[in-house]
Image (spheres, helix red, strand yellow):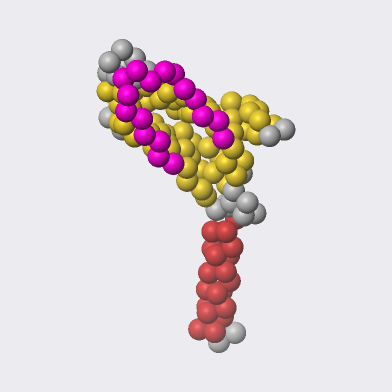
Amino acid sequence: MNTSFYNSTISASSQEYLIRITEPGYYFADAFLFANLSGTASVAKDIYTVSAGGPGTLIGTLTFDASATTPAVLAINNHQELYIIDRYTPGASSAIDGHFNGFTQAVPGPSPLIGTGAAIGFCRKLRRRVKGG
């Protein structure tokens, strides 16, 4: 998601939205926030669990201001739904030109174990053939 503003007179604003992964077994791994800011402007992202279609328990907050040089990152584990509140806080003679949100997803943990189990089983069968048993 990319949101852009460029106006030194813009007032504080916020945006709320719900994001969801519908594929069973997949979940959000982390979130990041980056912005092109000037002056004393800042952006923040509050990440919540979902409760009755609205914000539930706060998982964490990402903040980014003009002095930051790398994206803010927050680990999110085992959630398929998130309620997000993005906030923009202007400052005197400041602006925002690009607000970048990112979310990554992860696959469930047992999948690599299934592959490991299959490899061990194959090795055992191969060893029996080599030994002649």
Picture layout, residue 120 above or below residue 110: below
- Asked whether, in this view, residue 10 is left or right of residue 128, the answer is left
Span highlighted in magenta in the image = 1-17
In the image, residue 49 lies at what x, y percent? 62, 33
In the image, residue 31 lies at what x, y percent? 46, 38
In the image, residue 92 lies at what x, y percent? 31, 12
Picture layout, residue 23 above or below residue 48: below
In the image, residue 113 lies at what x, y percent? 57, 59
- Asked whether, in this view, residue 76 is left or right of residue 52, the answer is left
Say which quadrant the N terminus sits in. Answer: top left
Asked where in the image residue 9 lies, by quadrant, the reply is top left
Q: Is residue 68 visible?
A: no
- Which residue is depicted at the point 31% across and 31% down? 97
- Point out the residue furthest to the top here: 92
Say which quadrant the C terminus sits in. Answer: bottom right
On whether residue 6 falls in the magenta region, the answer is yes
